[in-house]
Amino acid sequence: MKIAILTLTGQRDELIDKLLAEELREYGHEVNVRNYIYAGRETVCYEKPDVVIHPMVGGQYKFDFVQKCKEWGIEVIVRRGEAGQGREQFELLDDNRKSIILGNWDYSPYVDLELTWGQEFTDIIAEQGCMGCIPADKLKACGAFAFDPYFVPRFKREANLKRTILFATGFSTCDCKSDYCELGISEASDYHEEIYSIHRQARDMWIWAIKEMHRRNGDEWAFELKVRPGEMTEEYERELSGIVKVHPQMCPSSQVLEGVDILVHSGSTMAIEAMLLKIPSFNFCNVNPDLLLASVSPMISEYKDLEWRIGRAEYGLSNLNAIVYAELTEHLYGVIDGKACQRAASFINDHIAGKQIKTDIPNEWPKETKYLEDGVHLIKQYGDARWVCTGCRNVYYAKPMGISRCPYCSLQIEMTNRNKQPAGVLK
């Protein structure tokens, strides 16, 4: 079979998808890994795959994508990029948070197989997931995808001249203010505003804390920063110029973690990644509603406590809560053994074995202005600049600088004086 794996971000997904591709090639399949944002439509229309492995369906663009693939006869498989939730933690959530985790789009008619992490969340999806239920036989729990790259043989870490702290942000709603990635909630909703406020306050605190830590410890400590998928780097670069090394948005977390001594996060799976590299971690200004995941590393709300703990953290020794970690593997992530991609490939191969797939894929994706917003024009208006979408390459017109959404593919792109060529994140 010809299989296209569409990878959403280079921070983590690309590493996982390449491992999955290697496992699928062992079964004799022809597999290509392509960037979903910038090459997804071209991949489908030019390479004409029999099978597409797609990111979680959250948002109008992704929904439209899998619907069109199914219409053309392509077998659609979804690989969830996040673990979801354990049952006990899930039941404590309100309906808004449950809908964010499960998904706000009923894509069940267009998906043939969905690959998940742990069994508990897999069962929850089968019972009540994604607006309409996905049948249990279409769901396969594979284990913790995100940690497979840490089981690949790696180079020995070099010692840093200064104690190096990585701040891994988690405040994407501050920039997107929309349905980026897994959220899929309306920008106009009250619940969106609630999340935006939480993220905005946390980001402000982080920026202040990094400045203060540099003022007090800059001679002895070095500072690096990595943004969460969906976050823009511009505000951090502007506010923290000369203070921190800001890694490119698409830089893999595994690559960044290899060069630091301490991780500061805000309730992230990166705490587990740090543990696998024997790096201590601290959860500062937690924004993760999953209290189990949030407490896997020490939770800190005050700057003085953070500075004190960083100064006394032991090099090369994880400080993860072993009891919480055991709970997470049992109820949330599933097994962490570096073999999630291997299990996923086996499920995929079994699913498509013997199938007679007949596709009818056009040579070009239909050009439709389904995502046209106020302030964006198809014909140039006074004061407009010419924008070329970095995703679908179509041309439209909007104000010379700022953020706009492509009317043809819904890619949110930003143009500034510093960056004349717009860079985008998927909406």
Image (cartoon, helix red, strand yellow):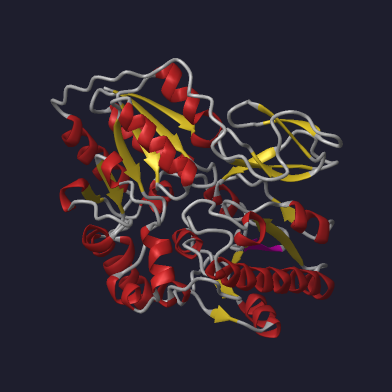
The residue depicted at 59 percent of the width and 81 percent of the height is 300
Q: Quadrant of residue 85?
A: bottom left
| Range shown magenta | 163-167
199 or 406: nearer the eye? 406
**Residue found at the far left of this picture:** 354
4 or 271: nearer the eye? 4
378 or 322: nearer the eye? 378
**Left of 157 or right of it: where is 108?**
left
Residue 129 showing in the rendered view: yes
Q: Quadrant of residue 374?
A: top right
Q: Quadrant of residue 346?
A: top left
Residue 157, placed above or below residue 382: below
Q: Say which quadrant the N terminus sits in.
A: top left
**Left of 334 or right of it: where is 307?**
right
11 or 106: nearer the eye? 106
The residue depicted at 36 percent of the width and 60 percent of the height is 102
Residue 222, placed above or below residue 404: below
Residue 203, placed above or below residue 35: below
